[in-house]
């Protein structure tokens, strides 16, 4: 009985999390705010079917927290054009028990007025290893057509 209640509670939490998500990228892109002069847009996404599904990958740009990515979501941030360091720092609770490896940060050049796409993936599930990679815009738009904007992040610092 207790296990059944836990499953129901987990399902309800999952539905609540999905309800807070935003539009798919094509819907967003059709009415996105313009990129300010001297800035660039960075879109980071995590495709569907990147277990563990209950793991929310954190994302930082130049050491500043910008959001978290549940499975099958994307987020965007506008930054000054130039080179920026992207990272996915370990969650203290996972890292303390050896369940998450440090992420190898990447440097990304953001050209002024352009959108750059980065995919966040999990290389393994035990322990979790997050990796980041710049993605060709055509492939990224194809991937993003199927996933929704990440819910607003909480407790990033």
Image (cartoon, helix red, strand yellow):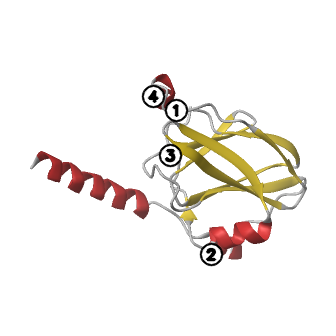
* Distance between mark 4 and mark 1 Cα atoms: 6 Å
Query: Which is in the foreground here, disc 4 or disc 2?
Result: 4
Q: What residue is shown with label 2?
A: 27
Q: Are marks 4 and 1 in contact (CB under 8 Å)?
A: yes
* Number of numbered discs on residues: 4
* Distance between mark 3 and mark 4 Cα atoms: 12 Å
Q: Position of residue 31 (x, y in %)?
A: 69, 74
* Distance between mark 4 and mark 2 Cα atoms: 35 Å
In front of the other: 26 or 133? 133
Q: Which mark is residue 139?
A: none
Q: Position of residue 63 (x, y in %)?
A: 71, 33
Q: What residue is shown with label 1?
A: 91
Query: Which is in the foreground here, disc 2 or disc 1?
Result: 1
Relative to residue 7, is residue 129 depicted above or below? above
* Distance between mark 1 and mark 3 Cα atoms: 9 Å
Mark found first going from the N terminus, 3 or 4: 3
Q: What residue is shown with label 3?
A: 56
* Distance between mark 2 and mark 1 Cα atoms: 31 Å
SS for callout 4: helix
Q: Are marks 2 and 3 in contact (CB under 8 Å)?
A: no
In front of the other: 37 or 126? 126
Q: Quadrant of the C terminus?
A: top right
Q: What residue is shown with label 4?
A: 93
Apparent side of residue 19 relative to residue 146 in the rendered image (left or right): left
């Amino acid at each position: 009985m207790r296990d059944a209640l836990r499953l129901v509670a987990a399902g309800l939490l999952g539905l609540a999390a999905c309800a807070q998500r935003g539009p798919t990228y094509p819907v967003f892109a059709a009415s996105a705010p313009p990129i300010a002069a001297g800035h660039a847009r960075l879109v980071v996404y995590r495709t569907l079917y990147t277990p563990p599904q209950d793991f929310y990958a954190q994302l930082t740009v130049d050491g500043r927290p910008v959001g978290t990515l549940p499975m099958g979501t994307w987020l965007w941030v506008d930054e000054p054009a130039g080179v920026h360091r992207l990272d996915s720092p370990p969650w203290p609770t996972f890292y303390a028990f050896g369940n998450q490896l440090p992420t190898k940060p990447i440097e990304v050049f953001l050209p002024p007025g352009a959108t750059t796409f980065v995919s966040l993936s999990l290389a393994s599930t035990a322990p979790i290893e997050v990796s980041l990679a710049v993605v060709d815009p055509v492939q990224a738009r194809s991937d993003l057509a199927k996933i929704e904007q990440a819910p607003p992040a909480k407790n990033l610092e």
